[in-house]
């Protein structure tokens, strides 16, 4: 329940696999629900802006090299120091109590990498300052929020939405994180104990992801809270008070979005509702967390606040692929950008999701991602258009590189064994005896070109084929064998902002040669 889209309305806006039901072979018209003209106009404006950016896109290797050298020169000392601190932190026996779960590895990696980027690029920390590890408390807060998010989502599923609503609306319980000043220093605390609130049947049920009971899950969260208090009381009184207040603010803002999901979720939400929800869910929380980080490392946040917006935009881009992989879980529970597009603009994709959501919730990594790309292509294309708009309207060169890195690692699964433990390939979702390169290419082309929707150009459909190809190791190698070094670089290091027309040309060239 943490951390899309652009502000306002301009650019506004388990591992074995059995195939889920495939849509029919016929071309289908993706009927559009009764959406407002303002909303449709805004979407068309976004698409137009992206096309205009593509037309003006001028990739120059020399300029790219210059930017890269300029960036790496400032990282020569900071980066190895960052790696040293990361290794040192992971040897912390107390902290490894919470970091023991392999399933948390990717989350932990992202937090650590994000921390390094914020501290060195945004707040300009030197290598010497990184050694002091001043922002570690902020990392603990992020971990607590993300781990806590999975806990409360899990107990909601176990106890039932209506029962959770009754608990949340109790006038006798204060569920918000608070802090107080004691003789020992500042103390973050909750007034209630979850073990006194939930029935034993829920507390003793097993969380499928981590293989522990929800009571044990809660004990891990309590340990994280204790760790936060340990580091909080290493600060002086002034800094400790500011940090405690900001930690409470960030955690409570996250809890407010959860309450909204439980109490106020309306399945007929508009794009305006979605944008406001995401602003509360992402921008406001990120601003607080960045302010906390500034306090911890001794940077006056007002000096850097003007830059917070672009970093928040980068996080919103991450939320896009998070929404894409969580679409089956979110569709009946909270607002989700992919659900929005499917329900309002790609009706057949919405019907497919409703029919296959339970099956999808058993998928992980590339096995899940490839299904979403193949069977909800229109919705995915529109989500990618938002990611591209964020890239060229909100982000600096360095931020775009970080954005591209995160997308190719966490969505495409490049060099990420956590997303591809069983060497997934598209053959596992293709019906029929033939599972060669030709049959896989034919399968994905047939899946994509059924769509008939006014917002999607032929070039967008061809470009989408590349996204699917990049998830299959055999097809990716086949593609890379047929394109030059510059095109390989663009597909990896410039994945998000790679112009649609150029990307579609690669697909056409590949398919012309093979089909």
Image (tube, grey):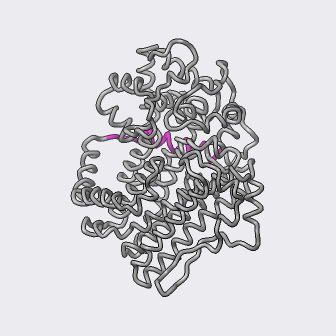
As drawn, 268 above or below 372: below
Number of numbered discs present?
0
Q: Is residue 275 in sight in this rendering?
A: yes
Q: In the image, what residue occupies the spot 70% across and 61% down?
A: 198
Q: Residues in magenta?
A: 40-59
Q: In which quarter of the image is the N terminus?
A: bottom right
Q: Tell me if 511 is positioned left or right of 359 in this view.
A: left
Position of 255 relative to 272 (above/below): below
Asked if residue 416 lies in the magenta stretch, the reply is no
Give how far across and how far down residue 441 sits, in percent: 48, 19
- Foreground pick, 151 / 373: 151
* Residue 301 shows in this picture: no
What residue is rendered at 55% in x and 20% in y?
Answer: 430
| Residue 237 image point, x, y percent | 43, 85
- Which corner quadrant of the image does residue 374 belong to? top right
**Which image quadrant for residue 285?**
bottom right
In front of the other: 378 or 153: 153
Residue 350, percent from left and from top: 69, 36
Q: Residue at x 57, y 26 (%)?
A: 448
User: x, y percentage for residue 373?
Assistant: 55, 33
Prevailing secondary structure of the magenta residues: helix
Which residue, as the protein is rendered here, is positioned at the far bottom?
183
Q: Viewer-proximal residue, 265 or 230?
A: 230
Residue lying at 29% horizontally and 41% vertically, measured from the top left: 60
Q: Does the magenta stretch include residue 48?
A: yes
Residue 231 located left or right of residue 288: left
**Above-or-below relation of 125 to 512:** below
Is 310 left or right of 320, judged from the image as shown?
left
């Amino acid at each position: 329940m943490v951390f899309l889209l652009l502000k306002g309305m301009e650019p506004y806006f388990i591992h074995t696999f059995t195939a889920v039901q495939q849509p029919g072979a016929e071309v289908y018209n993706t009927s559009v629900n009764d959406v407002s003209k303002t909303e449709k106009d805004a979407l068309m404006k976004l698409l137009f802006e992206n096309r205009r950016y593509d037309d003006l896109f001028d990739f120059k290797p020399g300029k790219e090299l210059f930017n890269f050298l300029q960036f790496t020169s400032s990282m020569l000392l900071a980066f190895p120091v960052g790696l040293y601190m990361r290794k040192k932190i992971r040897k912390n026996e107390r902290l490894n109590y919470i970091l023991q779960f392999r399933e948390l590895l990717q989350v932990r990696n992202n937090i650590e990498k994000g921390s390094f980027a914020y501290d060195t690029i945004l707040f300009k920390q030197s290598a010497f300052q990184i050694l002091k590890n001043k922002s570690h408390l902020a990392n603990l807060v992020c971990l607590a929020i993300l781990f806590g998010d999975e806990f409360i989502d899990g107990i909601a599923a176990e106890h039932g939405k209506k029962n959770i609503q009754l608990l949340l609306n109790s006038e006798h319980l204060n569920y918000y994180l608070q802090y107080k000043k004691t003789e020992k220093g500042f103390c973050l605390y909750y007034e209630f104990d979850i073990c006194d609130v939930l029935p034993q049947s829920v507390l003793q049920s097993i969380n499928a992801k981590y293989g522990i009971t929800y009571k044990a899950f809660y004990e891990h969260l309590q340990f994280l809270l204790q760790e936060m208090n340990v580091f909080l009381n290493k600060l002086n009184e002034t800094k400790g008070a500011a940090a405690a207040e900001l930690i409470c603010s960030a955690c409570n803002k996250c809890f407010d979005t959860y309450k909204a999901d439980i109490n106020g979720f309306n399945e007929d939400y508009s794009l305006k509702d979605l944008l406001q929800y995401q602003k509360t869910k992402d921008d406001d929380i990120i601003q607080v967390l960045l302010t906390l980080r500034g306090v911890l490392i001794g940077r006056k946040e007002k000096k850097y606040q003007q830059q917070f917006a672009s970093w928040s935009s980068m996080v919103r881009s991450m939320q896009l692929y998070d929404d894409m992989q969580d679409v089956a879980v979110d569709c009946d529970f909270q607002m989700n950008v992919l659900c929005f597009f499917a329900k309002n603009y790609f009706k057949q994709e919405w019907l497919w999701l409703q029919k296959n959501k339970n099956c999808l919730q058993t998928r992980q990594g590339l096995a899940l991602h490839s299904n979403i790309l193949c069977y909800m292509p229109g919705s995915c294309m529109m989500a990618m258009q938002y990611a591209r708009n964020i890239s060229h309207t909100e982000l600096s060169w360095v931020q775009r590189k970080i954005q591209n890195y995160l997308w190719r690692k966490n969505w495409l699964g490049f060099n990420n064994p956590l997303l591809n433990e069983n060497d997934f390939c598209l053959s596992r979702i293709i019906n029929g005896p033939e599972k060669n390169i030709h049959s896989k290419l034919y399968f994905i082309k047939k899946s994509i070109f059924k769509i008939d929707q006014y917002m999607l150009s032929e070039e967008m459909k061809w470009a989408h084929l590349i996204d699917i190809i990049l998830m299959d190791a055999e097809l990716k190698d086949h593609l890379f064998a047929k394109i030059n070094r510059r095109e390989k670089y663009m597909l990896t290091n410039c994945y998000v902002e790679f112009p649609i027309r150029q990307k579609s040309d690669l697909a056409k060239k590949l398919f012309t040669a093979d089909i």
